[in-house]
Amino acid sequence: MKKLLPLAIGAALLAAASSAFAITDEEGNASLQFNFSAPGARSLAMGGAFIGLADDATAAFSNPAGLVQLAAPEVSLEFRANDFSTEYAHSGTFTADPFSTAGVNYREADSDTRSPSFLSVVLPQEDWAVAFYRHEFLNYETAFRTEAISSIYPFDAAIDVSIYSYGLSGAFKLNDRWSFGASLNAYQMDLDSNTRRFTTVADTLVRYSTQQHGDDGAFGFGLGAQYHINDQWQAGLVYRRAPKFKYTASIVPGTQTFPRLDKQAYLDTPDLLGLGLVYRPTDAFTLAFDVSHVQYSQLTDDVISNFNLNDDTAAGRAALEPLLTKDDYEIRLGAEYTFTEMEVPLSLRAGVWRDPEHTVRFNGLPNPAFGDAVANAVLFSHGDDEMHASLGFGWAFEKFQLDAAFDTSERNQTLSISGVLRF
């Protein structure tokens, strides 16, 4: 079995050395936390519903068409602190035929990241604008240790992956109703993971590790449009094309005698198509609604086992292929009320949004004749939709705006502080 019979893999590894894959079935890949929320504490407090609104410096990423709404040059900076937990199979027992994980014990590994998540500079003119920005697209790390789960050997897994983009955005105002924008993004991905596998065979301690390492750059782009229906209603549309990154997946021998194996693999990040609608019943009150289709399935297109091809036949590969993520919709709703009569206007904000389940999952029931597929079905078996709630506030001084927000769900909490300086 994959991750079960380490001494049986040597010859098959050499035969597969020239293959190229999508993302691998490394356990740490199961719950990558992509950030499709618009940057900035203001949008986070509104549940990330910002595609239609997009009326500050963060529009450079969220919807570049909104940049023409700015009246003066702006510099925006955001810091985010994320705390999140990753569920994993820890110990217990399972049955292969009929397949059941009723005896498996699941635990959560707690992780956190702290980093500057967004920086932008916007230079607006009368009917057009240009912006430069840096955005944190993915910042994820976790580590956990399992015990024996029936015949699946224990392992230690750790992964640290980040993706940042540097972008140039431009927008122009076609008329009083329509504006359009585009962005070109240079992405940089850094990936480092190591899963140490160990067991005892014939009273001998056996060790080896599966590793992923990558430092790759790629380009993406975004397109946006905004339509001002009337003084109360406006809408926005955005499409973001995210890139594919190349990295190296390796099997590193410990106490085994097989040679080291390095293979080329890919991290194909999901594209997004989003629609936003904004309603302003008064000058002080704003409601925003976004719905976005995220192509999570790109992450696992053609994924197969990278670590134990001891049955490199069509039937064997087909038994391992059901590891996948599914396309789904993010739905966001946010509100903002500004006390405009105050000398320094204060804004209160709140929002809710649905983060669809997008962990790497084994789809269906495994073929009990293929132990590798059974192991994957156990280890990649959990994930749920999450409902987020958010709150925040902002103070708008003459030249400076300070915003703060907190977003929470069952397994994720995010604190954001951002500022905008206007010239």
Image (spheres, rainbow, N blue to C red):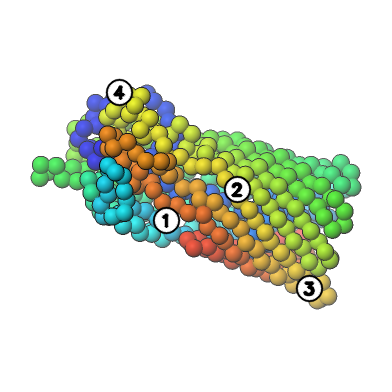
Q: CA distance from mark 4 to mark 3?
A: 68 Å
Q: Is residue 294 left or right of residue 151?
A: right
Q: Earlier in the sequence, mark 4 or mark 3?
A: 4
Q: Indicate which disc residue 329 carries.
A: 2
Q: Quadrant of residue 338?
A: bottom right
Residue 188 seen in this snapshot: no
**From mark 1 to mark 3, how far is it between C-alphas?**
40 Å
Q: Which residue is mark 3?
A: 339
Please tell me which residue is depicted at 78% across the width and 73% down the height of the picture: 339
The local secondary structure at tag 4 comes to helix
In the picture provided, is 204 more to the left or to the right than 191? left
Measured as percent of width and height from the top left, residue 210 is found at 32, 40
Q: How many marks?
A: 4
Which residue sits at x=89%, y=47%? 176
Circles 3 and 2: CB atoms closer than 8 Å: no
Q: Nearer the viewer, residue 273 or 134?
A: 273
Mark 4 residue crowding within 10 angstroms, few (<14) / some (14–19) / many (20+): few
- Of circles 3 and 2, the one toward us is 2
Mark 4 lies on residue = 15
Q: Secondary structure at mark 2?
A: strand
Q: Amino acid at mark 1?
A: Thr
Asked if disc 1 and disc 3 are in contact, CB closer than 8 Å, the reply is no
Q: Residue furthest right?
A: 176
Q: Residue, x 24% and y 41% (percent of image)?
A: 4
Query: Hey, what amino acid is under mark 3?
Result: Phe
The tag on residue 152 is: none
For marks 3 and 2, the one nearer the N-term is 2
In primary-sequence order, the first of circles 2 and 4 is: 4
Decide if residue 7 is in sight here: yes
Q: To which residue does mark 1 refer? A: 86
Question: How far from the left and from the top, in percent, is residue 67?
Answer: 77, 49
